[in-house]
Amino acid sequence: MYKVVVVDDEPVALNHVCNIIKKKCPTFEVIGMAGSATEAIRLIETHIPDLVITDIHMPGMNGISLSTWIKEHFPEILTIIVSGYSEFEYAKKALKTGVSEYLLKPLTPPEMIATMNVIENKLKHKFYIKRNNLIRALCNNENIEARLINKYFAAGKYYVAIVRKNGLPRRFERRSGFEIFSNEEENFYLYGRDEFESLYLIPEIFFNRYNYKKMIERLFDSTKSEQFYITLLTSAKTFELEKISETIANLYRCLNERIVIGANQLLYIETLEPFLVNNTKEREAFEKLEHALRIKDTRRLFAELNNIFSLWEKHGFNQIYIEGRIKYLLQIIMNVWVVNIDKAHVEYLIDDVFFDSVNMGELRENTIDIIKLCFPELKSGLQDDKDQLFDTIIRYIKNNLAESISISKVCKEFGVSQTMLSRMFRKNLDTSFNNYITVTRINQAKQLMKSNENTFIKDIALQVGYTDQFYFSRIFRTVTGTSPKQYMDSL
């Protein structure tokens, strides 16, 4: 409920406002009544309400001066000025001081309800924006005051789950994807560090434990696709709101340890066993691979690479472990061989291959492509500088936006490697393949909305390649800063 402080030096008028709120405005709660601005300031500093309703004329500091003080000290608090007809023009000027609304005496319940509905919509949007910022901060392991969490999140216990498509997010901020949040009208909270991730915070009141597990199983089955693999990590238990920070941090730690390239996994934190990497066969195979590198035997190098990737796949080694091993190998190449390639460029390429590869076979081929870039005699067939090929790929993407488009599918269509295609997008557009697809789809959706304002949002989503209308709405809001409905209403 939204907290309200009511201020009026006339007890009858004060009680009248409070009674209307109590009887007719169920989403608001009066947490303080004041007979003067001075008394109101004490209440505001103690309780930090969401709304202050104040009479315009009071002894000492008047309502407009109080509103000005509120704007200076607590700008997030909304205010309503109550005035008589003789003060109407004076009250309208108060809007310039930051007052949200004004009401004329004598107050009637219908007028009061209408104004409170306007305030409620403003507060809903304000809480939505603030909550999104808090969720982002929590997911970035920032310390958040308990009072803010209690203020902007609904009270009670929560279930938590995270769904990750493909590998972990890219490490480089310049090339990261688009954050996603739940839509304003949804009853759960959602955040994704990019468009391939969804962290769900779901109030316990919507599910008992049995129904929650069933919902999670349906979510897992409906999310699976040939275009990517998914890791769904959750807990069968709810958590208290005051433990939200440590709960989210623990979930992300587990996710980092459990992503296995190409494996669809539904995991419960309670049943996870420690991840062990002490595998003798893997260690021996890696030593052979390292030896081939140090003696500069490229034929043996690629044979040992195939062997080590087979072992990694067979024993389910996680992304973090494999990524560390591959970076170590590439560092050996740069130290032992004379390599004319920028190290930062290699880091970008590694970022790409772990983000885009949907199975260990793709990861192996993409890794080999990176290694070949280090040896001029092995990369003679690369064509990532061919403008004509890139232009053809861009036309193909634009002509097939309604279809399921993945980097793997485009590579097969044009006979290029994922590493080459990633380099093309960086060189020509200074962006990633997935970011380009997302922005192009949203721009096309905007054009469709302009050309036919009566089209349903779900139909527009389908025409630009999104089968889930709610997911489309989240992406649209992230890219444009507004929801599809708000965008169409503005046309």
Image (cartoon, rainbow, N blue to C red):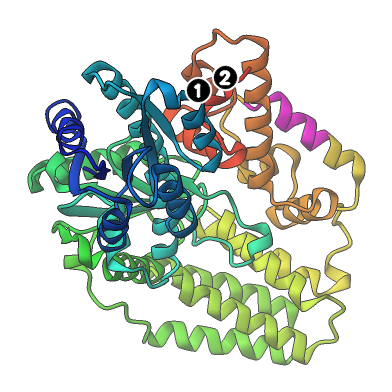
Query: Which image quarter is the C terminus in?
Result: top right
Residue 130 locus on image (x, y percent)? 42, 51
Which segment is the magenta one? 392-401
Q: Is residue 418 left or right of residue 35?
A: right
Q: Identity of the amino acid at label 1? A: Lys
| Residue furthest front in the image | 59
Where is 297 relative to 232, above or below? below
Is the residue marked by circle 1 packed among few (<14), some (14-19), or many (20+) residues within 10 Å? few
Q: Is residue 368 visible?
A: no
Instruction: Tell how many labels.
Output: 2
Q: Is residue 58 visible?
A: yes
Q: Helix or strand or loop: what does disc 1 sit on?
A: helix
Q: Position of residue 174 (x, y in %)?
A: 68, 61
Contact, CB < 8 Å: mark 2 with mark 1?
yes
Residue linked to disc 2 = 488
Please say whether residue 60 is one of the residues in the magenta stretch. no
Please name the residue shown 25% across and 57% down the image. 43
Location of mark 1 (residue)? 485
Residue 315 as seen in the image, left or right of residue 328 = left
Residue under the image location 64 percent in, 66 percent down: 172
Majority secondary structure of magenta residues: helix
Left or right: 106 with respect to 271? Answer: right
Camera-nearest residue between 413 and 483: 483
Q: Quadrant of residue 44?
A: bottom left
Label 2 – label 1 distance at C-alpha: 5 Å
